[in-house]
Amino acid sequence: MFQTLNKTIYKAFGHSIQSDIPLPELQQIDDPNESVDIVIRYADLTAKWLEHSDSSRTSVCTETMVMFRVPDLAIFAVENGTIIYISPENGADEDKMRLYILGTCMGAILLQRKILPLHGSAVVIDHKAYAFVGHSGHGKSTLASAFLQQGYQLVTDDVIAITLDHRNIPYVTPAYPQQKLWQESLDVFGMSSNQFRPLFERETKYAVPVESYFSSDTLPLAGIFELIKTDCNQVQIRAVDKLERLPLLYRHTYRKSLLSDCGLTKWHFDMTARMSGSIDIYQLQRPLNEPTVHQLTDMVLHAIGK
């Protein structure tokens, strides 16, 4: 734990965070005496990067450290699940650095803390969390947004942080009240992009605040829905059998490339094996170029008995 010097403290993924760089996406903690779990600091990582890397590598990973360089932006180092160092290039854009801090860096923090990060979104239905996972562009955030349009609450978007209790029941810890939606998704819901901030270098993807639809409660994870775009003619749903579940959970683990070098392969297998027997898992197939989000919403609700 760290003691802060009267700086802003944020809350995300069940942890308190103090940061040298403002993180307006996150919820603030008003108590100045709050102890801090994770700190984000500016530092000069040039010598450390040269010591550990070579010209052919863009990242370095050990059991206690993940370090990577984004050309023309910054070097990032994540250590021991407690600290993120940022070494910016001259003229580095703060918005773009925040994307990496709240994305890859936070994913590494969760892994170092042995919290499973899945790539997807999760919503609250009947006081339980349901997750939507899938590859980029397959409609995870759009489906979650459709549930928000119906009055349900968001738990997390992009990274789903999962822990297990002593009974092997998985729980989802809330992230922060923001979604990332493509222009096509905004069009489906009749939302104007003029009121939202475009994500850096992604002029057709926007940061959409959802404070009034955000759940700050840690909730049991009751089900996972994998979204897949195929050349099928209509939406389809099927239950995922037990032999398919571990590959599915591995496939959608956020920054899974870090597992081996961080010495987490066995932990990941054990954790996913334990949780896979405690939840329902489905696969949702959808046509490639048709708007099917409202059909998918109905399918999800029917599958869970709503």
Image (cartoon, rainbow, N blue to C red):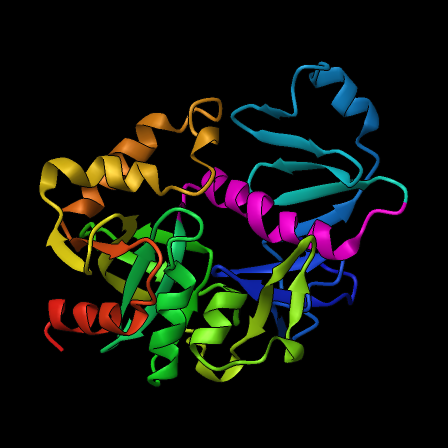
Q: Position of residue 185 (x, y in %)?
A: 46, 69
The relative height of residue 24 versus residue 283 in the rendered view (above or below) is below
> On the rendered structure, is 200 left or right of 212?
right
Q: Is residue 96 magenta?
A: yes
The front one of 261 and 295 is 295
- Write down the quadrant of residue 274 in the picture: top left
Q: Quadrant of residue 193?
A: bottom right
Q: Is residue 264 magenta?
A: no
Classified by dominant secondary structure, the portion drawn in magenta counts as helix
For image coordinates 36% across by 75% down, the residue present is 146
Q: Is residue 180 visible?
A: no
The front one of 163 and 103 is 103
Nearest to the observer: residue 1 or residue 112: 112
Q: Going 31% across and 27% down the picture, which residue do you hit?
A: 266
- Highlighted magenta segment, given as a residue range: 91-118
Is residue 267 placed above or below 229 in the rendered structure? Answer: above
Picture coordinates of residue 230, whole percent (x, y): 27, 47
